[in-house]
Image (cartoon, helix red, strand yellow):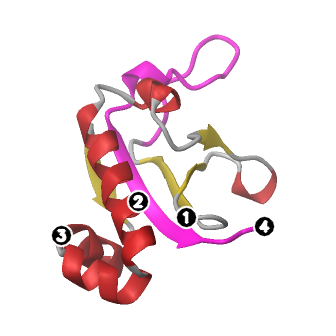
Amino acid sequence: MNVTFADKKLEKWANNFALAQKKLGNSRATKYHQRLDDMRDVDSFDNLRFLPGNFHNLSGNRKGQWACSLDHPYRLIFEPAEKPLSANQHDTPILSDLKIVEILEIVDYH
């Protein structure tokens, strides 16, 4: 799957592990890079739920966004980058059609 970034600093951290370690710490930088590598290795958004890291969709004011665990309590927040989303007759997005993810932020939202 293709990975894009909503924020230039997230992209810089993704492309420079030493910089990510400096800004995020070793544990979070390592998990960040692992999660991004895992995302790049799957065929579609639908396969994210099978990856390690508790990939899950969010609700409430974050509806349409997804999260996965980094180092507790931090989460990597992302969403499908393709708009509009293809949906079935029940207006549920067809996740297997989604091939691009956009990284939004790293945050502790708890």
* Residue denoted by label 3: 15
Structural distance between the alpha carbons of marks 3 and 4: 28 Å
- Judging from the image, what secondary structure is the residue with disc 2 in? helix
* Residue denoted by label 1: 71
Q: Is residue 69 left or right of residue 8?
A: right
Q: Nearer the viewer, residue 60 or 35?
A: 35
Range of residues picked out in magenta? 83-110
Query: Which is in the foreground here, disc 4 or disc 1?
Result: 1
Structural distance between the alpha carbons of marks 1 and 2: 7 Å
Query: Identity of the amino acid at label 2?
Result: Lys
Q: Quadrant of residue 42?
A: top left
Query: Which is in the foreground here, disc 2 or disc 3?
Result: 2
Structural distance between the alpha carbons of marks 4 and 2: 19 Å
Q: Earlier in the sequence, mark 2 or mark 3?
A: 3
Assess whether mark 2 and mark 1 are in contact (beta carbons under 8 angstroms). Answer: yes
Q: Quadrant of residue 28?
A: bottom left
Q: Is residue 37 above or below residue 74?
A: above
Please say whether residue 95 is one of the residues in the magenta stretch: yes
Q: Earlier in the sequence, mark 3 or mark 4?
A: 3
- Judging from the image, what secondary structure is the residue with disc 1 in? loop
Q: Quadrant of the C terminus?
A: bottom right
Q: Quadrant of residue 38?
A: top left
* Residue denoted by label 2: 31
Q: Earlier in the sequence, mark 1 or mark 3?
A: 3
Q: Residue at x 38, y 46 (%)?
A: 101
Structural distance between the alpha carbons of marks 1 and 3: 19 Å
Q: Nearer the viewer, residue 104 or 88?
A: 104
Q: Quadrant of the N terminus?
A: top left
Query: Identity of the amino acid at label 4?
Result: His
Main secondary structure along the magenta-highlighted residues: loop
Assess whether mark 2 and mark 4 are in contact (beta carbons under 8 angstroms). Answer: no
